[in-house]
Image (cartoon, rainbow, N blue to C red):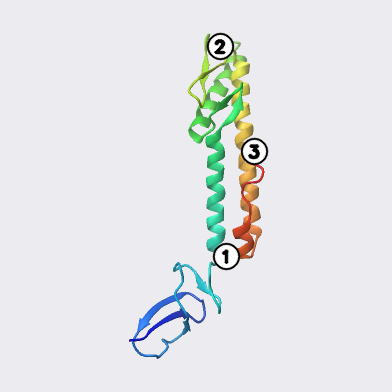
């Protein structure tokens, strides 16, 4: 029994493998083999990845790289400050509390310390130090977002699959 592989003549999408007669299904073209992945399309000589899939995978890789940068934290006071999304909320809240403390001329809690990435504590002796800590986090998260957005915009502007696949997402982090 003969096996034949087919792709849609108009879109290049994989139709499947058929056994039996030699008659080509309507709207299909015979191809020498099936794709490695059903999302690939036939370009007339080989199976290739569509640009939109390569672009989506590259953008997902940029998002993962951004998350790793947040996980790595920020150097502050000789230690690594955690700046993951859950840490950002805490830092913003305490930065605002410190601003209120300054505005109200209220005392800052004695012995206040911030837990760092290595589970040690960084002394935060006054409201100004807490404000500086929160501002440093805010500036770094904004910087990392800018790097992420620049990479995503660059990938979206590219039109060739090979160029998108070769785009280096590791610059400027």
Q: Secondary structure at mark 2?
A: loop
Where's the N terminus, which quadrant? bottom left
Percent across and percent down for residue 152 are 61, 52
Q: Closer to the observer: label 3 or label 2?
A: 3
The disc, 3 or 2, on the residue closer to the chain's N-terminal end is 2
Q: Secondary structure at mark 3?
A: helix
Q: Residues within 10 Å of mark 1 (few under 14, many from 20)?
A: some
Q: What residue do we see at 61% from left, 31% from top?
A: 138
Q: Tell me where residue 133 sits by quadrant.
A: top right
Cα–Cα span, label 3 and label 2:
30 Å
Q: Closer to the observer: label 1 or label 2?
A: 1
Residue labelled with disc 3: 143
Residue labelled with disc 2: 108
Q: What residue do we see at 55% from left, 20% from top?
A: 97
Q: What residue do we see at 36% from left, 86% from top?
A: 2
Where's the C terminus, which quadrant? top right
Q: Residues within 10 Å of mark 3 (few under 14, many from 20)?
A: some
Q: Is residue 18 above or below residue 121?
A: below
Residue labelled with disc 1: 51
Percent across and percent down for residue 169 are 61, 49
Q: Is residue 45 above or below residue 167?
A: below
Query: Which residue is situated farthest in the front direction here?
Result: 1
Q: What residue do we see at 47% from left, 67% from top?
A: 39
The disc, 1 or 2, on the residue closer to the chain's N-terminal end is 1
Depth order, front residue of 17/147: 17
- Which numbered tag is attached to residue 30? none
The disc, 3 or 1, on the residue closer to the chain's N-terminal end is 1
Q: Is residue 163 left or right of residue 3?
A: right
């Amino acid at each position: 029994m003969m096996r034949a592989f087919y792709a849609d003549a108009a879109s290049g999408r994989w139709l499947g493998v058929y056994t039996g007669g030699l008659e080509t299904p309507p709207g299909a073209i015979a191809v020498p083999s099936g794709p490695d992945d059903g999302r690939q399309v036939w370009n007339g000589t080989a199976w290739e990845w569509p640009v939109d899939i390569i672009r989506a995978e590259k953008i997902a890789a940029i998002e993962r790289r951004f998350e790793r940068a947040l996980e790595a934290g920020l150097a502050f006071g000789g230690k690594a400050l955690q700046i993951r999304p859950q840490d950002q909320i805490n830092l913003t809240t305490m930065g605002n509390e410190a601003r209120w403390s300054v505005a109200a001329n209220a005392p800052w809690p004695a012995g206040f310390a911030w837990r760092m990435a290595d589970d040690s504590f960084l002394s935060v002796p006054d409201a100004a130090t807490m404000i500086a800590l929160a501002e440093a986090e805010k500036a770094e998260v904004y910087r990392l977002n800018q790097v992420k957005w620049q990479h995503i915009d660059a990938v979206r502007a590219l039109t060739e699959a090979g160029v998108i696949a070769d785009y280096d997402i590791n610059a400027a982090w």
